Structure formats: structure tokens, C-alpha cells
Image (cartoon, grey):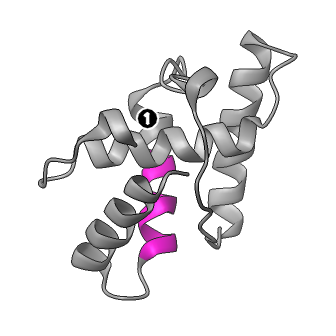
Amino acid sequence: MTEEMQKALREVSSALYGAKGKSRWVRDALSMLAAEDPAMTSVGFGEAHFVPTCSEQILLSDGSEEILENLVARVRRQDPLAEGVKSQVLRAAVRWRLERSSRPFELNRL
């Protein structure tokens, strides 16, 4: 992810769930993406120009891992040759939830 996305993720997840709530925030973001973007139109958006500057570790529960696998399968049905689909889905979920957060973020940099 980008450093801007990482900073926004840490800030908003900490505000909502506390200092150790980042993984929970991302798990909830995956659920939101699954429900609100069933066609997975946000996955892969801007990936051609995406340059990662950092990474962020998250822990997924079994239920969240299943949601992620289902979302990956949706994307693969549309584009069987796509690479890095899990990462793309996770970034899309983070962007999706940040766009809908109460604090505005400059998402063109995320």
C-alpha cells in the first residue's frame, strides 16, 4: 500500500476500534466491500499506476478469510489471468471503507 493509505488506515481504525483494532477494521471493510460492491468494480482500480511504498500486516479470522476467498473468486471469474488478486481485493476494501469514513481522506493518493 502507499504510506498515505497506511497512515489513514491506522488513524481511522485506531479511532474506531482502539490501538489494536486495525485487523478488525479491515475484516469489517472486506464484509462491506462484499455487500456493497458485488461486481467487484473497485478491485483493480488504479492498479496499473499503483506503486507500493510500504506494507501492513493484518490478521484475518476464518470467516474473513472465507469472505476474501469468495471475493477473489469473483474477480477471477471476470479476469482469470489477474495477478496479485488477494492484495488487490484487500487494498480495494481499505479504499472502499476509507472513502465512506467520517473523516475525508485524499484518496487520489491512496
Q: Name above or below for residue 50 compared with residue 59.
A: above
* Image location (x, y in percent) of residue 10: 37, 71
Specify start and end residues of the magenta stretch as a single range: 22-31
Three-letter amino acid code of the residue under disc 1: Ala
Write down the quadrant of residue 85 in the picture: top right
Q: Which residue is mark 1?
A: 35
* Image location (x, y in percent) of residue 12: 27, 67
Q: Residue furthest right?
A: 81
Which residue is at the front of the view, 32 or 45?
A: 45
Which residue is at the front of the view, 14 or 34?
A: 14
Residue 84 located left or right of residue 99:
right
Residue 90 located left or right of residue 66:
left
* Image location (x, y in percent) of residue 93: 48, 44
Q: Residue furthest top?
A: 78
Q: Quadrant of the C terminus?
A: top left
Q: Residue at x 64, y 47 (%)?
A: 67
Which residue is at the front of the view, 9 or 29?
A: 9
Q: Residue at x 79, y 21 (%)?
A: 76
Q: Residue furthest bottom?
A: 19
| Count of residue discs | 1
Q: Is residue 13 magenta?
A: no
Q: Residue at x 31, y 86 (%)?
A: 18
Residue 65 located left or right of residue 32:
right
Query: Element under label 1?
Result: helix
Which residue is at the front of the view, 62 or 92?
A: 92
Q: Residue at x 77, y 29 (%)?
A: 73
Q: Name above or below for residue 38 compared with residue 94.
A: above
Q: Is residue 24 magenta?
A: yes
Chief secondary structure of the magenta portion: helix
Residue 46 located left or right of residue 73:
left
